[in-house]
Image: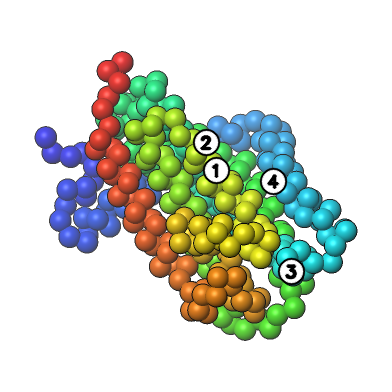
Amino acid sequence: MASTRPGWDDDGADGRLRAVGHALFAFGLIAWMWVRSTLAYRTSFVLMTFGNFAASGLDFVAILLMFSRVDALGGFTLPEVAFLYGTCSLALGLADLLVGNVERLGARIRDGTLDTLLLRPVPVYVQIAADRFALRRLGRTTQGLLVLLWSVGRLDVEWTVGRVLMVPLMAVCGAVIFGAVYTVGAAFQFWAQDAAELQNSLTYGGNALLQYPPTVFARDLVRGVTFIVPLAFVNWLPALWLLGRPYPLGLPVWTAFLGPAVAALMAAGAALAWRHGVRAYRSTGS
């Protein structure tokens, strides 16, 4: 039977571009539907967004409390730690907003509702990522962005063009890396059916780790988030180059610019894992 997904079976770049365009358009429609539903109760939306903003800001409050007793943490000043905090929080916030809902896949597999999504002429990943699109998650993104802007104005660095461009590049690459981790964790649920906590340990746990300088952690842990799950490319490596500080593992300076390559490789690996998971899925029969 011919596929009903526009451009899905077409050959060449044009067919792939049409498929991507169709997927993005579908994501926008589904997300907008949930946004309209949320904004129907504006007071509730404002309160939940503020609650998300305040809850995510408690981590930074803890950092402020620490610096009320010390002048430096692992050799880093408050603006430098705030810069690390802001970059990783912004990256995670963007990833969580756009694809964080894929962690619900396990529940859909268990209750059999995934079968319904497979029948629709829209990629399953797009449907799950956009399902129950929570605009209130902008609270985390906004909070991370505000801390980042505050820190940028207080860093003792010479703002060259390269350093200025590195900041948004970190946010984009970091969001892609976190999004890839979300996707791989969701793909694993095709077999495990309940691996959300493992996924959260890498996303939210990784975010908590990256908020602090690598100099306060054991070298083995730093190696793990550099070479095994390369979360260090979210902010540690590029931020240490921007701040003019050496990396604890003695890596060459050019590794600070590998963020886009690492993000692309992780996104490609996540896409393969997801595709393999979908192909291996067997209906619950319910």
Q: Position of residue 223 (x, y in %)?
A: 52, 62
Mark 3–mark 4 CB contact (< 8 Å): no
Question: Residue furthest toward the right?
Answer: 69
Q: In what element is the residue under mark 3?
A: loop
- 196 or 248, which lies in front? 248
Q: Give coordinates of residue 226: x percent, y percent.
A: 50, 62
Residue sitting at x 69%, y 32%: 44
Q: CA distance from mark 1 to mark 3?
A: 25 Å
Q: Amino acid at mark 2?
A: Glu
Quadrant of the image occupied by residue 171: bottom right
Q: Is disc 1 placed on a helix, strand or loop?
A: helix
- The residue to which callout 3 is attached is 76
Say whether residue 173 is left or right of residue 242: left
How dense is the environment of label 4, judged by Cα within 10 Å: few (below 14), some, or many (20 and up)? Answer: many
**Residue at coordinates 63% horizontally, 63% vertically from top-left?**
214
Q: Which mark is residue 197?
A: 2
The alpha-carbon separation of the residues under discs 1 and 4 comes to 16 Å
Asked if labels 4 and 1 touch by Cβ distance under 8 angstroms, the answer is no
Question: Which quadrant of the rendered structure holds the C terminus?
Answer: top left
Which element is circle 2 on?
helix
